Image (cartoon, grey):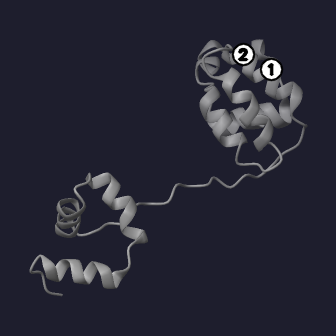
Amino acid sequence: MTIFEWINQILVHKKSWNSFTESDQKTFSPFIINRWLSMDEEFIEVVNYFQKYSIGTLEPREVYKWYSDFLPRGKRFNKYIKSKKNKKYDEELINILCDYFEDSKSNIIEYIDFMDKKQLKELLKMYGKGK
Protein backbone atom coordinates (compact mmCIF):
# COMPACT_ATOMS: atom_id res chain seq x y z
CA MET A 1 0.00 0.00 0.00
CA THR A 2 1.11 3.57 -0.63
CA ILE A 3 1.21 6.39 1.89
CA PHE A 4 -1.94 7.86 0.32
CA GLU A 5 -3.80 4.59 0.76
CA TRP A 6 -2.72 4.41 4.40
CA ILE A 7 -3.84 7.98 5.04
CA ASN A 8 -7.21 7.15 3.47
CA GLN A 9 -7.48 4.05 5.66
CA ILE A 10 -6.76 6.11 8.78
CA LEU A 11 -9.07 9.00 7.93
CA VAL A 12 -11.82 7.56 5.72
CA HIS A 13 -12.23 3.78 5.71
CA LYS A 14 -10.91 2.98 9.21
CA LYS A 15 -10.66 -0.77 8.62
CA SER A 16 -9.32 -3.08 11.30
CA TRP A 17 -5.55 -3.73 11.24
CA ASN A 18 -6.15 -7.47 10.86
CA SER A 19 -8.03 -6.93 7.59
CA PHE A 20 -4.78 -5.96 5.86
CA THR A 21 -2.41 -8.54 4.44
CA GLU A 22 0.94 -9.07 6.07
CA SER A 23 2.71 -7.44 3.12
CA ASP A 24 0.42 -4.40 3.44
CA GLN A 25 1.11 -4.19 7.16
CA LYS A 26 4.86 -4.15 6.47
CA THR A 27 4.45 -1.03 4.30
CA PHE A 28 2.97 0.97 7.19
CA SER A 29 5.59 3.46 8.42
CA PRO A 30 4.73 5.47 11.55
CA PHE A 31 7.39 8.07 10.68
CA ILE A 32 5.92 8.75 7.22
CA ILE A 33 2.36 8.71 8.58
CA ASN A 34 3.34 11.28 11.22
CA ARG A 35 4.99 13.40 8.58
CA TRP A 36 1.95 13.41 6.29
CA LEU A 37 -0.61 13.91 9.03
CA SER A 38 1.37 16.83 10.43
CA MET A 39 0.80 18.71 7.16
CA ASP A 40 -2.78 19.29 8.34
CA GLU A 41 -3.00 22.31 10.66
CA GLU A 42 -5.77 20.69 12.69
CA PHE A 43 -3.67 17.59 13.39
CA ILE A 44 -0.25 19.12 13.93
CA GLU A 45 -0.43 19.36 17.73
CA VAL A 46 -1.83 15.85 18.10
CA VAL A 47 0.81 14.37 15.80
CA ASN A 48 3.58 16.32 17.53
CA TYR A 49 2.51 15.00 20.92
CA PHE A 50 1.96 11.41 19.76
CA GLN A 51 5.08 10.99 17.60
CA LYS A 52 7.37 10.48 20.59
CA TYR A 53 5.38 7.32 21.35
CA SER A 54 4.69 6.23 17.79
CA ILE A 55 8.28 5.80 16.66
CA GLY A 56 10.18 3.03 18.40
CA THR A 57 7.85 2.60 21.38
CA LEU A 58 4.59 1.37 19.84
CA GLU A 59 4.00 -1.29 17.22
CA PRO A 60 2.74 -0.08 13.80
CA ARG A 61 -0.66 -1.71 14.44
CA GLU A 62 -1.02 0.32 17.66
CA VAL A 63 -0.10 3.52 15.85
CA TYR A 64 -2.64 2.76 13.12
CA LYS A 65 -5.35 1.95 15.67
CA TRP A 66 -4.69 5.07 17.72
CA TYR A 67 -4.79 7.40 14.71
CA SER A 68 -7.85 5.75 13.16
CA ASP A 69 -9.71 5.86 16.50
CA PHE A 70 -8.66 9.36 17.48
CA LEU A 71 -8.73 11.36 14.24
CA PRO A 72 -12.10 12.39 12.77
CA ARG A 73 -13.50 10.56 9.76
CA GLY A 74 -13.35 12.43 6.48
CA LYS A 75 -11.30 12.88 3.34
CA ARG A 76 -8.75 15.68 3.59
CA PHE A 77 -6.30 17.30 1.24
CA ASN A 78 -2.93 18.20 2.72
CA LYS A 79 -0.38 19.86 0.54
CA TYR A 80 3.06 18.40 1.14
CA ILE A 81 5.48 21.07 2.36
CA LYS A 82 8.85 20.67 0.71
CA SER A 83 12.06 21.83 2.29
CA LYS A 84 13.73 24.89 0.86
CA LYS A 85 16.59 24.16 -1.46
CA ASN A 86 19.97 25.47 -0.43
CA LYS A 87 21.29 28.35 -2.43
CA LYS A 88 24.41 27.58 -4.39
CA TYR A 89 27.36 29.83 -3.69
CA ASP A 90 30.63 30.09 -5.53
CA GLU A 91 33.08 27.62 -4.01
CA GLU A 92 35.90 30.18 -4.14
CA LEU A 93 33.81 32.69 -2.17
CA ILE A 94 33.06 30.10 0.49
CA ASN A 95 36.74 29.14 0.76
CA ILE A 96 37.77 32.80 1.16
CA LEU A 97 35.16 33.30 3.88
CA CYS A 98 36.31 30.11 5.63
CA ASP A 99 39.88 31.44 5.69
CA TYR A 100 38.83 34.90 6.84
CA PHE A 101 36.44 33.82 9.61
CA GLU A 102 38.33 30.59 10.42
CA ASP A 103 35.11 28.61 10.40
CA SER A 104 33.64 25.56 8.66
CA LYS A 105 31.99 25.59 5.25
CA SER A 106 28.60 24.60 6.66
CA ASN A 107 28.66 27.52 9.13
CA ILE A 108 29.79 29.96 6.43
CA ILE A 109 26.93 28.89 4.16
CA GLU A 110 24.52 29.66 7.02
CA TYR A 111 26.13 33.04 7.73
CA ILE A 112 26.43 34.21 4.14
CA ASP A 113 22.74 35.18 3.88
CA PHE A 114 23.14 37.57 6.80
CA MET A 115 26.20 39.32 5.41
CA ASP A 116 26.01 42.65 3.66
CA LYS A 117 26.94 42.50 -0.05
CA LYS A 118 29.09 45.60 0.35
CA GLN A 119 31.01 43.87 3.12
CA LEU A 120 31.48 40.78 0.94
CA LYS A 121 32.85 42.88 -1.95
CA GLU A 122 35.36 44.60 0.35
CA LEU A 123 36.45 41.26 1.73
CA LEU A 124 36.98 39.88 -1.78
CA LYS A 125 39.05 42.95 -2.70
CA MET A 126 41.25 42.28 0.36
CA TYR A 127 41.97 38.83 -1.07
CA GLY A 128 42.81 40.30 -4.48
CA LYS A 129 39.59 39.29 -6.21
CA GLY A 130 37.80 41.58 -8.64
CA LYS A 131 34.18 41.45 -9.73
Residue 65 is tagged as: 1
Whether residue 81 sits left or right of residue 37 in the image: it is: left
| Amino acid type indicated by mark 2 | Arg
Q: Secondary structure at mark 2?
A: helix
Quarter-wise, where is residue 93 in the image? Answer: bottom left
**Pointer 2 residue:** 61
Of 124 and 79, the residue lying toward us: 124
Identify the residue shown where x is 63% and y is 13%.
22
Hey, what amino acid is under mark 1?
Answer: Lys
Is the Cβ of the residue at disc 2 closer than 8 Å to that at disc 1?
A: yes
The picture places residue 11, in percent across and down from the top left corner, at: 82, 36
**Residue name at image x 52 percent, y 55 percent:** 83
Q: Residue at x 59, y 24 (%)?
A: 27
Q: Does residue 94 lie above or below 18 as drawn?
A: below
Q: Is residue 127 left or right of residue 27?
A: left
Figure quadrant of residue 67: top right
Foreground residue among 37 and 87: 87
